[in-house]
Amino acid sequence: MTDTAPRGLPPGMDLWRTSQLNDAGINARAIAALVRHGVLVRLRRGCYIRGRTWAGQKPSVRSRQLIAAHAHGTLTTSGGGLVYSHTSAARLHRLFLWDVDDRVHITQKKTPSPISHGRDVVAHSRMLEEGEVVLVDGLPCTSLERTVVDCCLMLDFRQSLVLMDHALRIGADATRLAQLCAALRGRNGVLSLRRALQDADPRSESPGETLARELLLRLRIETPELQVKVRTVEGRHRLDFAWRDKKLALEFDGRVKYFDYAPTEEVIFQERQREKALMEDGWTFIRIKWRDLFQEQEFKIRVLRALRAAG
């Protein structure tokens, strides 16, 4: 079965409620068959997406699509009293999240009934102040600063630091964040929020760089500079981390660096040319990947050995 099968999917759309499919002549049995054959993907109860659309999306886009599915399935509008918050708002704001599930978080004025939302929804109740609700992608969600605070209260320190680094990088108001933090004295999770705000660095460009910096600090290794700019015969280059006096660089080889912005082979070729030019100028490199961030003893040995050799 394909998208061109009889009683195919309604044209011009990628996301449907069950009622919309029924109106197009696709009954429950046909919907089940389309799901089995991958033509449709069930995102949540009563909401489906075109299979090829879902297959072509990156994880971050899929996470936002689940929020859109909730909005589509519940006919959410900006005036409906339902606001996307916490990690769902973070996703709408395009903030980096690390190791966070895809449950949909909403905030309402009144405490909702336990059965009023699906199992994929986490409902919070609170009165939001003026200015704490904005529209992103046409959906009502908490403001950037309110979102960061709400997330840090429920995430652990490393998750909070990843989020805080990126929030400050894209323009979150540090003064406002400090004010919100001060007003939460004694609340559960406020320590992660306070530490993340204190240790955050907006120069970090990816979750991997944030976690590498946190690991270096926690292991009490000599602190490198971030985003160090160096000139060579090949031009001006920027290093993720560098001990400039030792001409030692630490680079995080995350997939995002190679796969999101340009053809893979071209980016890797340019990276190697840059590294070659720097090595000719006396620089040495430590290259780390995601797995190295969770093999802490081996990571520490590699970095300390490289620092001794360079120093």
Image (tube, grey):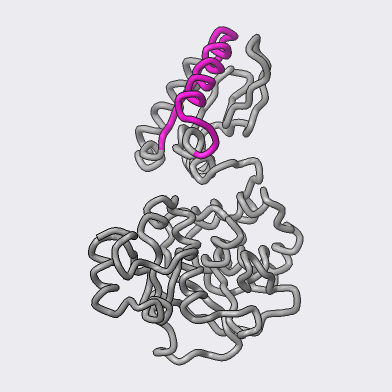
What residue appears at the point 67 percent right and 52 percent down from the top-left corner? Answer: 168
- Which is more toward the observer, 95 or 67? 67
What residue appears at the point 59 percent right and 24 percent down from the top-left corner? Answer: 243
What residue appears at the point 66 percent right and 45 percent down from the top-left corner? Answer: 202
What residue appears at the point 52 percent right and 65 percent down from the top-left corner? Answer: 87
Residue 43 percent across, percent down from the top left: 38, 68
- Which is more toward the observer, 246 or 97? 97
- Which is more toward the observer, 213 or 94? 94
Residue 46 is at least partly visible in this image: no
Start and end of the magenta stretch? Answer: 260-289
On screen, residue 111 versus residue 180, left or right, reads: left
Figure quadrant of the C terminus: top right
Residue reaching furthest to the front:
6
On screen, residue 156 versus residue 281, left or right, reads: left
Residue 260 percent across, percent down from the top left: 51, 39
Can you say whether 127 is above or below 175 in the image? below
Can you say whether 107 is above or below 90 in the image? below
Residue 24 is at least partly visible in this image: yes
Residue 111 percent across, percent down from the top left: 53, 90
Figure quadrant of the N terminus: bottom left
Residue 99 percent across, percent down from the top left: 42, 56
Figure disc tally: 0
Can you say whether 261 is above or below 104 in the image? above
Residue 254 colored in magenta in the image = no
